[in-house]
Amino acid sequence: MKKIPVMGLLPALLAVVLGASSNAAADDETFRVKSMAESEVQIKFFSQDRHVVWPGPDEHYTLSDYGEHAFRLRCVNGEKICYGAWVSGDEDRYWGAGYNGSEGCSSCCVTCQGGQTTTYILRDPVRR
């Protein structure tokens, strides 16, 4: 049986590990959102591919005016991200994926590719 020197395997193993990690390149995706709702709105963003929530699991961004807001998210290239927004104090009145990201939506998600979304305009939702 022929012995393979360990030192000969180390560079090859290191190349495989480093090569695999380079496939998960980081990007920034900017969500643009404008609330036209009469009430204050809260919003957060949910990764569909990792256990990541922006700004954090127990946090949210607040929209308290009619201005356009830009949310720059650090994400993995190719990662699917959905927004969820709701009227402050009323999680049953929501847009997109809703309060906890579990609601279905037809156009609230994008694929991270280092760009920016068109502006999502939130109008007063109906009570669900």
Image: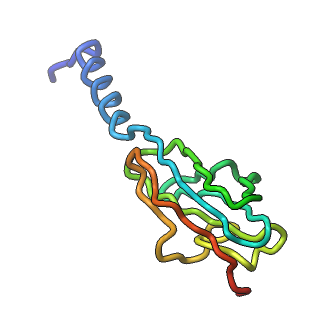
Q: Residue at x 58, y 68 (%)?
A: 121
**Vertical relation: 113 (above or below) 100:** above
Q: Residue at x 53, y 54 (%)?
A: 31
The picture places residue 14, in percent across and down from the top left corner, at 32, 23
Quarter of the image with the N terminus in it: top left
Front in this rendered view, residue 68 or 26: 68
Quarter of the image with the C terminus in it: bottom right
The picture places residue 10, in percent across and down from the top left corner, at 30, 18
Q: Residue furthest left?
A: 2
Front in this rendered view, residue 126 or 22: 126
**Vertical relation: 24 (above or below) 107:** above
Q: Residue at x 53, y 56 (%)?
A: 47
Front in this rendered view, residue 56 or 96: 96
Question: Which image quadrant is residue 17 in?
Answer: top left
**Vertical relation: 12 (above or below) 49:** above
Report the number of numbered marks: 0
**For this view, does 66 lie left or right of residue 19?**
right
In the rendered view, how is the structure colored? Answer: rainbow
Q: Residue at x 55, y 45 (%)?
A: 73
The picture places residue 5, in percent across and down from the top left corner, at 24, 14
Front in this rendered view, residue 89 or 12: 89
The picture places residue 42, in percent across and down from the top left corner, at 73, 61
Question: Which image quadrant is residue 68 in?
Answer: bottom right
Q: Residue furthest right?
A: 89
**For this view, does 89 lie left or right of residue 68?**
right
Question: Which image quadrant is residue 125 in?
Answer: bottom right
